[in-house]
Image (cartoon, rainbow, N blue to C red):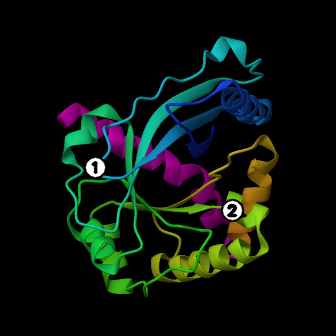
């Protein structure tokens, strides 16, 4: 089974947006069995949005599709993510602030840390802090859709990716699309070769696109059972 744990979602989708989402999900299921996460991005002051997945029976799926719910908290200020833990399958954080990034690595109850891939990262990644996140079983996400849409974003994406791979050695890293359009979805083989281009060996690249996602979801399931 393959995974794409970042399919952007809005709780205010119009008909055009819903059609785009259906096309993305349908394309995923033409390739293999898939687990996807519909991802809403919010700031800490917003009311927690709801996710209503499309009816799978309307997608023309060739292979089975499992749809999860994810929230990404986009903030440059300290926060408490604990109060939305039970609402979503995955809780991620994205920030431009070095202190918030460090707090996320060291303390926050989150599953995943992601980045703004369409702009230059505004702080230096600290390998010691990243190792602390790995020790806490937090995962890091690389997304490729921005790199497809824009040449400058591709440069920023590769800068973040190479630095992250250097500091993590590929451990607890996943690759997602972040795709708003079906044209931005790539075949798992293409994602595998992208991972290899970052300096990962064959087995490491395979883990990044398969095993790490499975491990992340298993971790979140165990956490949900305990709570």
Q: x, y percentage for residue 57?
A: 67, 11
In the structure shown, which secondary structural element does the residue marked by tag 1 occupy? loop
Mark 2 or mark 1, which is nearer the start of the sequence?
1
Q: Quadrant of residue 118?
A: bottom right
Check if residue 216 falls in the magenta segment. yes
Mark 2 neighbour density, 10 Å: few (under 14) some (14–19) many (20 or more): many
Residue 100 position within the rendered picture, expressed as x and y whole percent measured from the top left: 29, 71
Q: Residues within 10 Å of mark 1 (few under 14, many from 20)?
A: few
Q: Please give the range of residues in magenta.
A: 198-227
Q: Is residue 184 left or right of residue 208?
A: right
For mark 2, what is the residue?
Answer: 146
Residue placed at 48% from the left, 32% from the top?
A: 68
> Can residue 160 be seen here?
yes
As drawn, 3 above or below 161: above
Q: Quadrant of the N terminus?
A: top right
| Residue 56 belongs to magenta span | no
Q: For residue 109, which quarter of the picture?
A: bottom left
Question: Does residue 132 appear to the left or right of 180 in the view shown?
Answer: left
The percent position of residue 21, horizontal first and vertical second, equals: 68, 32
Image quadrant in which the C terminus is located: top left
Main secondary structure type of the part rendered in magenta = helix
Mark seen at residue 186 = none
Taking the spot 78% from the left edge, 22% from the top edge, the residue there is 62
| Label 2: which secondary element | helix
The residue positioned 44% from the left and 41% from the top of the image is: 70
- Residue 45: image x %, image y %? 28, 49
Residue that mark 1 sits on: 45
> Can see residue 186?
no
The residue shown at (78%, 74%) is: 151
Q: CA distance from mark 1 to mark 2?
A: 26 Å
Query: Quick check: 53 above or below 101?
Result: above
């Amino acid at each position: 089974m393959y995974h794409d744990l970042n399919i952007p979602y809005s709780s205010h989708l119009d008909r055009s947006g819903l059609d785009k989402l259906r096309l993305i999900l349908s394309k995923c299921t033409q390739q293999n069995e898939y687990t996807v996460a519909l991802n809403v991005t919010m700031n800490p002051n917003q009311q927690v949005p709801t996710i209503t997945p499309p009816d799978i029976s309307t997608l023309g799926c060739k292979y089975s599709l499992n749809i999860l719910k994810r929230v990404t908290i986009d903030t440059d200020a300290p926060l408490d993510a604990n109060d939305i833990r039970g609402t979503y399958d995955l809780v991620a954080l994205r920030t431009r602030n070095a202190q918030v990034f460090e707090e996320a690595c060291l303390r926050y109850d989150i599953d995943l840390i992601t980045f703004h891939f369409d702009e230059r990262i505004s702080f230096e990644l600290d390998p010691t802090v990243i190792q602390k996140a790995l020790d806490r079983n937090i995962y890091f996400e690389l997304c490729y859709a921005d790199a497809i849409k824009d040449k400058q974003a591709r440069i920023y994406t590769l800068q973040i990716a190479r630095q992250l791979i250097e500091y993590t050695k590929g451990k607890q890293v996943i690759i997602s699309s972040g795709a708003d359009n079906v044209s931005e979805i790539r075949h798992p083989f293409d994602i595998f070769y992208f991972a290899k281009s970052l300096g990962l060996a064959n087995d490491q690249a395979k883990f990044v696109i398969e095993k790490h996602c499975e491990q992340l979801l298993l971790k979140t399931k165990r956490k949900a059972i305990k709570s």
